């Protein structure tokens, strides 16, 4: 496995794809292709067979460095690996298209499912922008919402809404609107990207909005690093949620008005007559 | 593999668990356990390694007959199999608990993810009702929302809401409220259980609600039998959605105001500057 970096300022340029190459190779017939692969929560046994097969057969693997690390044991020794930092997603998508146009079998990895805040859309958009008619397949994976739910018990089960609290790409006003709407309509709510070291305000704001619609005792599940080393699962209440240890790799599930704690687990009854 | 049925009126009673057995065996020490396993959309290679391992090692496999059929090739030859009809979920959960209390290693299978309109909650609730302190693990799988999304392109990517149009267990007034709320707050909307032979009204009603908030040209993806034989993927518009071939095994994804068709695929831009 040869490793390259797409991080700005520390490019190991030998394998870094050049824009002009993309244009030059586009007119030729390509056997290259891209699979955008969801690796699931992190452990290799929570990945699908198809996802694993794609990674094992890849000539080029591109992903955020933390995710590349999770799968490095199944990457071919001679595969080219581009691992990059958070925030460089566009560069990674461009590199994937460029490499596929160089006739390579490319895998772009996302944690969880590549269609949930993942790389699938970006790769399709970049390929379209470059008029690159290469085959692109999206391989789904277990997303953090259901991986976290499984650890907590069965908090989803009924209708639910998935909301990212990161306002890097979505205006905060829209995130707030969605929190109000989902809370008022009694959806179970799954929060992705709840906070980071330098960004604690969004979770605090979300908490205040949720408290307008749900009682302080509403069950809340907090799962940190689901399926990875250092996993922590906590079933708490809306009132206590704000004191939990939360970072970007945490998924929070806020119950609806019917969610209850069964044993030590969080369950939203589906409505069966028992 | 010995097959039993939990269908009312055609019980093969030799292996059908008896309630009194449950009570008797409860006080003894049990090595029995239950795994509620998500088999993913249907194809064996879209299942996780962990899910497959659980099914391969099960002494008792319980599930809706269509799902049991999808995995029968990996069930141990001497495993006891209870396959049942739709609507008998409570009986299946009770059978699972009873068998675990008889010291069996039990797998309850759900299609997709067992925590999304699946069996996870019901099994936890039934075990609790019976004071059965048996280990219960939930094994997540790829849910229909993301499996269908992958076939369509990348329609989720941003915040989304998952709503079942089945009013068997949820009052229709609440489903309507959720449709209004999700549409108004510009969520991408995933519809599960959109309609069946005898139940066409809900989808028609949902369509009329969605049209109050989204333009008729809004991209809509319709995926029938995702990951199974006879899979059909259609990218259409909200206006044309109602004419599509839709049944209970269909997942519909309604784009938000930014969703567009890229190539022949449905993409909701995440908001990156390209």
Image (tube, coloured by chain):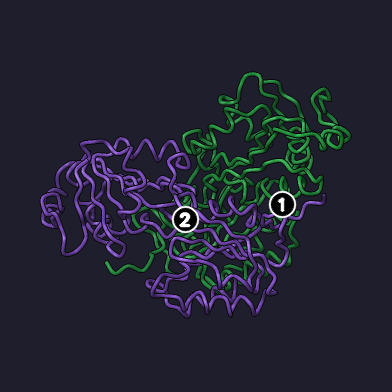
Chain colours: A purple, B green
Q: Are marks 2 and 1 in contact (CB under 8 Å)?
A: no
Please state the chain letter of the residue tagged with numbered disc 2 in the rendered image. A
- Judging by the rendered image, the residue that carries numbered circle 1 is B199
When asked about the image quadrant of residue B84, the answer is top right
Residue B42 picture location, percent across and down? 54, 37
Question: Residue, x 19% and y 41% (percent of image)?
Answer: A103
Disc 1 secondary structure class = loop
Q: Foreground residue, B29 or A196?
A: B29
- Judging from the image, mark 1 belongs to the subunit labelled B
Identify which residue is drawn at 46% across, 34% down. Answer: B45
In this rendering, the answer to whether B62 lies above or below B219 is above
Residue B217 seen anywhere in this rendered image of the structure: no
Location of residue A115 in the rendering, given as x and y in whole percent from the top left corner: 43, 55
Q: Quadrant of the C terminus of chain B?
A: bottom left
Reading the image, the residue beneath label 2 is: A225
Mark 2, Cα crowd under 10 Å, few <14 / some 14-19 / many 20+, is many
Residue under the point 59% across and 56% down: B191
Q: What is the secondary structure assignment of the residue under circle 2?
A: loop
């Amino acid at each position: 496995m040869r490793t390259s970096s797409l991080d700005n300022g520390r490019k190991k340029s030998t394998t870094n794809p050049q824009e002009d190459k993309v244009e030059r190779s586009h007119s030729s017939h390509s056997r290259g292709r891209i699979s955008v692969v969801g690796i699931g929560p992190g452990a290799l046994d929570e990945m699908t067979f198809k996802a694993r097969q794609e990674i094992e057969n890849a000539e080029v693997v591109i992903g955020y460095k933390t995710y590349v690390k999770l799968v490095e044991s199944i990457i071919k020794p001679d595969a080219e690996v581009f691992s990059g930092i958070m925030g460089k997603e566009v560069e990674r998508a461009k590199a994937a298209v460029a490499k596929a146009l160089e006739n390579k079998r490319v895998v772009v990895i996302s944690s969880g499912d590549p269609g949930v805040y993942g790389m699938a859309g970006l790769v399709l958009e970049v390929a379209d922008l470059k008029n690159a008619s290469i085959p692109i397949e999206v391989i789904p994976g277990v997303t953090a919402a259901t991986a976290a739910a499984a650890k907590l018990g069965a908090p989803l089960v009924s209708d639910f809404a998935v909301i990212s609290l990161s306002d890097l790409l979505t205006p905060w006003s829209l995130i707030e609107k969605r929190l109000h709407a989902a809370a008022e309509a009694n959806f179970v709510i799954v929060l992705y990207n709840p906070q980071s070291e330098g960004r604690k305000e969004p979770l605090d704001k979300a908490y205040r909005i949720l408290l307008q619609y749900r009682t302080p005792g509403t069950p809340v599940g907090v799962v940190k690093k689901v399926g990875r080393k250092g996993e922590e699962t906590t079933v708490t209440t809306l009132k206590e949620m704000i004191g939990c240890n939360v970072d970007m790799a945490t998924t929070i599930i806020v119950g609806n008005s019917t969610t209850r704690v069964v044993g030590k687990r969080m369950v939203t009854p589906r409505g069966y007559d028992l």
